Amino acid sequence: MTDCLCIIPARMGSCRFPGKPLEPLLGLALVLHVYERCALSPGIGRTVIATCDEAIAEAARAHGAEVVMTADSHPGCVDRTDEAVALIAPDMADDGLVLMVQGDEVLVSPKMCDDIIAAYDEGGSQVVNLASKMFSREDHEGPNSVKVVTALNGNALFFSRAAIPSPSRTPDVPMYQQTGVIGFAKSFLPKFGKLPRTPLEQIEGIDMLRTLEHGMSVRIVHTEQETIGVDTPDDLARAEKMLRHDPVTQQYLSSLS
């Protein structure tokens, strides 16, 4: 199995929900739920929170989590992840796996992480992205979630904020959303930052389209489990309810109490 370094990028300055990484759910900050859930994965050797905010760093250190401070000028989480890897793992092998889990992906599970690792070990792509099933037609049609469709070989065909595939002719269509759980070959990260931004990337506001538009593949791993990227206070309340009944939550909350 490939050595895997997990980086959790998080910052306080979210446009839609400022300060969300430290919002509590069941008594534990959002970003620390993500940290604990990733750390349960047997395939991950090291889990690190990457942030530009001292408030997040202080909370993480008090919890016992490893932290790396990054610049506050990054345009996106992939760039923050790249800097974090350069700072803490400069000698990591080029084909080593960096698993980026965004700090608001509160329902990430150890199995999801391990499925990404297994797909990367199979080869064929330097980027492996988790896609989770959507259960709400409203979510599928809304612009806040990023939808993804795949080719028969399992690679992404397109990411969009529109409802893809369209339900206009066949109402019962597969509905999957891109999640902020993405595995990268270590050598891919600095290359990505140097690629020019692409037309569809800018139209849709989806950075992984840059990879597709430059002719590279993104392998998609599907999960039937629901995930939530917390972008609003309503998302936070919904996530707390789901966490309360999630068996993974009890694995770490019981040990922290």
Image (cartoon, grey):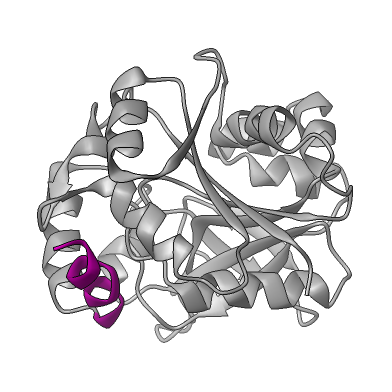
User: Most prominent secondary structure in the magenta stretch?
Assistant: helix
243 versus 127 height, above or below: below
Residue 50 seen in the current view: yes
176 versus 85 height, above or below: below
What residue sits 41% from the left and 86% below the top? 172
Magenta span includes 53: no
- Which residue occupies the foreground of this view, 117 or 93? 93
Residue 184: percent from left, percent from top: 73, 52
What residue sits 73% from the left and 27% below the top? 197
User: Would residue 208 be found to the left or right of residue 73 on screen?
Assistant: right
Numbered-mark total: 0
Residue 138: percent from left, percent from top: 26, 64
- Which residue occupies the foreground of this view, 43 or 99? 43
Quarter of the image where the N terminus is located = bottom right
91 versus 255 height, above or below: above
107 versus 216 height, above or below: below
What residue sits 57% from the left and 41% below the top? 206
User: Would residue 255 be found to the left or right of residue 173 on screen?
Assistant: left
Q: Which quadrant of the figure has residue 242?
A: bottom left
User: Would residue 114 be found to the left or right of residue 184 on screen?
Assistant: left
Quarter of the image where the C terminus is located = bottom left
Residue 165 seen in the current view: no
In the image, which residues are magenta? Answer: 247-257
Residue 16: percent from left, percent from top: 27, 31
- Which residue occupies the foreground of this view, 243 or 63? 63
Residue 15: percent from left, percent from top: 31, 25
What residue sits 55% from the left and 15% below the top? 71
Magenta span includes 254: yes
